Amino acid sequence: MKVLIVGAGAVGFNIAKQLSQEGHDISVVEENPELVQRITEKLDVFVVAGNGSSLNILETAGVRDAHLVLAVTNSDEVNIVVCIIANQYGRKIKIARIRNSEFTGKDSLFKGNGFCVDHMINPEQIIVDSLIKIIETPGATFAVDFPIGDILLRGFHVPKDAPIAGKKFSELEGIQYTDSFLIVSIQRNGEMIIPTHKTEILPDDDIFVLVAKMGLPYFLPMVNRRADEVERVIIYRTTRVGIQLAKRLEDSSINVTMIEPKKEKAEKAAAELEDTIVLHGDATDIDLLKEATIEDTDFFIALSEDAQTNLLTSLLAKKHGAKKTVVLTNEPALVPIIHQVNVDVVINPRLITASAILQHVRRGQILSIAKLGDSEAEAIELIAEEGSEIVKKPLNKIRFPKRSTLGAIVRNGTMLLPKDVNAINPGESVIVFTLPDAIEKVQALFSKKR
């Protein structure tokens, strides 16, 4: 597939890298000379230096022959213009990263025609949705929902006193309600492990669990004896993500406090929010943290544009009583580093955006893609196509790619684990967990032979 990517920042670079490795023909347009040099040196792609909203630049980059155009610059307006221009060159898929919720919200006037954009990806909305799911799931550090079949993917850090700590997977099979969940991956010392029957769950492991929505209450006590409902949240900085999150939390019984160093922004947020307490000051001020009752706080969520500030304030909040901390960073390379310190959840908008875009690029009927934490492993929800190798054959006869595992099958709206299924039927939704080198083979297994 010929893919034109406009914007070589973290999102554009990561997508270009992954799609190039998967064998796609990639062209990239970028105006910043430093980013042009970086992508030229690091990746085997065709790079054009210039403004992505220029017709001549897009012509040079191959917009005429591209099957897919991805507009992921830092400007919503430029991304929209790119898609409008690309639309004049015939039928092609056009995807734009759009941060302004006025364009992407449910009540948006542009939801119908989309400015010639086929798919608008709003990372801020995705971040808020993810944080809400984490807050609503006691003990969770990662959260993705698969809409078909009410299937949830949750990540948990395994405490030393967790009932499942020290148990092998073979020992878990006899536990009641094991038909409603499956531990699909373990992250240990920076390594992603696809477990087998002999794999032992160790304290301080990070596990990823596929669980039926109805079965979640039965699984939670197995991983955390003392996971309580969230009652109090502190949000640092009144960014657009912070305001959206506060508004969503106001609809619940959770007490929300926001901290904002800039007086004008604090006053504006206080006027916009109804039940949220807004404090003017800095989260590095111990007295202000005490005024915000940091000792009783369940989540301290740092959402400033500066990752170092977020990390510093989160560590300080944890020291003074916050049970869990969330750090936002725009640099993908910092995610594994921040995970090494005493931070519970790391949010990276660029990795989230890349995952949302990839589901529209991969072949086969892919419904959604989720990166597992800061690893390269992916959870892929896809449809088993009629005529593909996976359907109507006994599962024990299927040669499933190494470094991947079949997570669940959705049949008649119900989640089934592989052990309970003889064969997959055409049109059924399936969730697969895979490492990068097996993605191509997984897609081929579920795609119709052409």
Image: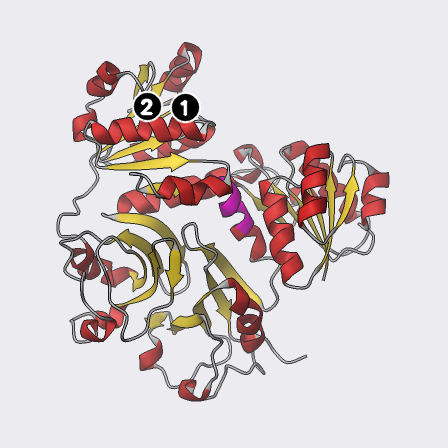
Q: What's the mark number on residue 258?
A: 2
Q: Are marks 2 and 1 in contact (CB under 8 Å)?
A: yes
Is 157 situated above or below 417?
above
In the rendered view of the protein, which quadrant contains the N terminus? bottom right
- Secondary structure of residue under mark 2: strand
Q: Give the magenta range.
A: 348-354
Q: Is residue 376 left or right of residue 288?
A: right
In the rendered view of the protein, which quadrant contains the C terminus? bottom right
Q: Determine crowd level at label 1: few under 14, some 14-19, many 20+ residues with C-alpha closer than 10 A.
A: many
Report the magenta stretch's main SS.
helix
Residue 31 painted magenta? no
Q: Which residue is mark 1?
A: 238
Of the residues shown, which amino acid type is indicated by label 2?
Answer: Met
Question: Is residue 321 in view from this perspective?
Answer: yes
Is 207 situated above or below 234?
below
Q: Position of residue 354 (x, y in %)?
A: 55, 49
**Depth order, front residue of 402/361:** 402
Residue farthest toward the top in the current orientation of the protein: 263
For image coordinates 41% across by 59% down, the residue present is 147
For image coordinates 39% across by 13% down, the residue present is 267
Count numbered badges in the picture. Answer: 2
State the separation of the CA atoms marked 2 and 1.
7 Å
Of the residues shown, which amino acid type is indicated by label 1?
Answer: Thr
Q: Is residue 85 left or right of residue 169?
A: right
Residue 351 painted magenta? yes
Q: Position of residue 140 (x, y in %)?
A: 28, 49
